[in-house]
Amino acid sequence: MKKVLLWLWQLPQNLAGWCISRNANMLQIYFGNVYFKKFYKSGVSLGSYIILDNCYRNSTLLLNAVKHERGHQKQSLYLGPLYLLIIGLPSFIGNIYSRITHKSSEWYYSQPWEAWADKLGRVER
């Protein structure tokens, strides 16, 4: 029952994660299920789903990427349906902005919503 309530609490992001994760390769690791597919050298956490670009699959960056996305999953648990507005939208815009302006990854991960995800996921940068 608890799993159903949590899934409903995060309904918008779970539906988006389910849709995006279709036709992806799933890898079960210590942190749970991670889905790999072509995703523009990026990752996303949508409810119960972590989706990473294929470039992370055999990368030394995999652990930090998964830990960071797990941090976003915790944010989703705290914020429920507000997650996409409070975290998802600023994260998406920040990602696009950093790519267009060639900002460093340090800049991107210093944004409040990203730094909070790193803290929750226990990422060491």
Image (tube, helix red, strand yellow):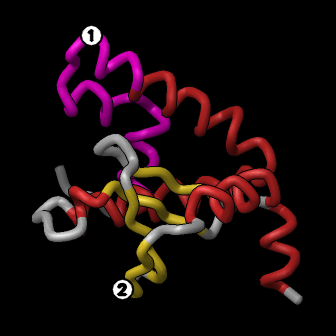
What's under tag 1, amino acid-wise?
Answer: Thr
- In terms of depth relative to the viewer, which is nearer, 54 or 62? 54
Closer to the camera in the image, 27 or 65: 27
Please identify the quarter of the rendering in which residue 6 is found.
bottom right
Disc 1 to disc 2, C-alpha distance: 34 Å
- Residue found 35% across the figure and 65% down from its top: 66
Q: At 10% across and 64% down in the image, what residue appears?
A: 60
| Drawn side of residue 83 relative to residue 23, left or right | right
Q: Is residue 88 above or below residue 31?
A: above
Residue highlighted by disc 2: 29
In terms of secondary structure, where does tag 1 sit? loop
Write the start and end of the magenta stretch as one range.
96-120
Tell me which corner region of the image, top left, top right, bottom left or bottom right, holds residue 19: bottom right
Q: Badge 1: how crowded within 10 Å, few (<14), some, or many (20+)?
A: few
Q: Is residue 101 left or right of residue 42?
A: left
Instruction: Name which residue lies at 49% across and 64% down.
Output: 50
Outermost residue toward the front in this view: 23
Check residue 12 for magenta coloring: no
First in sequence: mark 1 vs mark 2 = 2
Q: Position of residue 61 (x, y in %)?
A: 17, 59
User: Which kind of residue does numbered mark 2 sit on?
Assistant: Ile
| Cβ atoms at labels 1 and 2 below 8 Å apart | no
Picture quadrant of residue 21 = bottom right
Residue 101's tag is 1
The answer to whether 64 appears left or right of 17 in the picture is left
Query: How busy is the neighbourhood of tag 2: few (under 14 within 10 Å), some, or many (20 plus)?
Result: few
> How many numbered markers are drawn?
2
- Residue 85 % position (x, y): 71, 33
Whether 113 is drawn above or below 38: the answer is: above
Note whether 37 is above or below 27 in the view shown.
above
Q: Position of residue 43 (x, y in %)?
A: 40, 51
Label annotation for residue 7: none
